[in-house]
Image (spheres, rainbow, N blue to C red):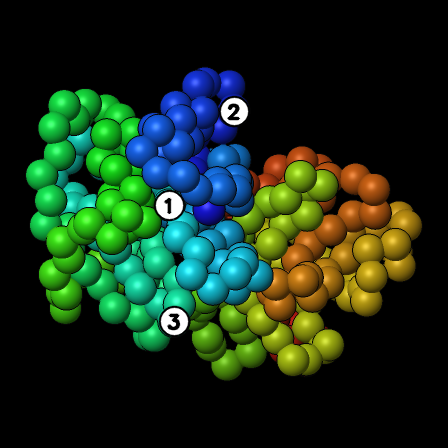
Amino acid sequence: MFLSDFGYLDPYVGIVKGAIKSSCNVEIIDLSHNIDSFKLKSAQFILKHSYKYFPEGSIFLVVVDPEVGSFARPIVVKRKNYTFVGRDNGILTFDNDFKVFSVDEGFKDVSATFHARDVFAKIVCKIINKKINLTKIESFEKFNIEEVVFSKDEQKGEVLWIDKFGNIITNIKTNSNNYELVINGFTIEKKAQYYAEFKESFFAIEGSFGFLEIAKYQDSAAKILNVKIGNNVIVRSKNESNN
């Protein structure tokens, strides 16, 4: 499985897949290549909530790499019966049930600007061909996309993803229905069970990943509200707002 921020305008996705196919016989499924450039949290969100739907034994190549060409090391993460390959930048270490390995390999003819082709693609094939040297490590980068700030009657989080339909996916979960959601100065009070429930207004809804989303029927909530990935979101108890 291949996840990146390369997009499809340039040939980078095809070149990496070609490099892998040239060295090992493997099926490559594109998870997404539309991650906003360098957005580590968005990449982790997509990866964390997608990998379990693939067959055990799958390998995930993740290339969202703000420090390409730097000394940030490549790592291999093993989680249950899945393997993840990428940079040591926190994307791959999203829970507590994994082991992290450094890659004890030398690579020839490495471009300083295309490690996906010259390093990570080769690591994937070495894993498939069982010809890779790994060393378990205990120190590595880690962050948690689901970390929110709690106060008495508020949760403060952020926008993790905006899907093709303009639905705004936050990192906030709630078991209550007695709240209002505030983003970019707009207050959302309606809560829907399905996307077509409210035809005219914005609404909050629990999406398929379990997080609160902001949506508008057959329209882009993100575009209308001028919301970007990383924007702050507040979920506030309506009891507080009524005092």
Tag 3 or tag 2, which sits nearer the N-term? 2
Q: Residues within 10 Å of mark 1 (few under 14, many from 20)?
A: many
Q: Label 3 to label 1, Cα distance in Å? A: 16 Å
Crowding near pointer 2: few (<14 within 10 Å), some, many (20+)?
A: few
Q: Which residue is mark 3?
A: 80
Give the quadrant of residue 98.
bottom left
Q: Position of residue 121 (x, y in %)?
A: 30, 37
Mark 2 in CB contact with mark 3 (< 8 angstroms): no
Give the residue pinned by disc 1.
Answer: 61
Q: Which mark is on residue 8? A: 2
Q: Residue at x 31, y 64 (%)?
A: 78
The residue type indicated by label 2 comes to: Tyr
Q: Secondary structure at mark 2?
A: loop
**Can the viewer see residue 193 in this picture?**
yes
Identity, as a three-letter code, of the amino acid under mark 1? Leu
Viewer-proximal residue among 180 and 191: 191
Residue drawn at (40%, 50%) of the image: 60
Q: Does residue 89 show up?
A: no
In space, the residues marked 2 and 1 are separated at their CA atoms by 17 Å
83 lies left or right of 213: left
- Three-letter amino acid code of the residue under disc 3: Lys
Q: Nearer the viewer, residue 155 or 24?
A: 24
State which mark lies toward you, 2 or 3. Answer: 3
Which structural element holds mark 1?
strand
Q: Front-most of 214 and 87?
A: 87
Give the class, few, some or many, for how many residues have Cα within 10 Å of label 3's Cα (few <14, many ≥20). few
Query: How many numbered marks have been drawn onto this rendered protein structure?
Result: 3
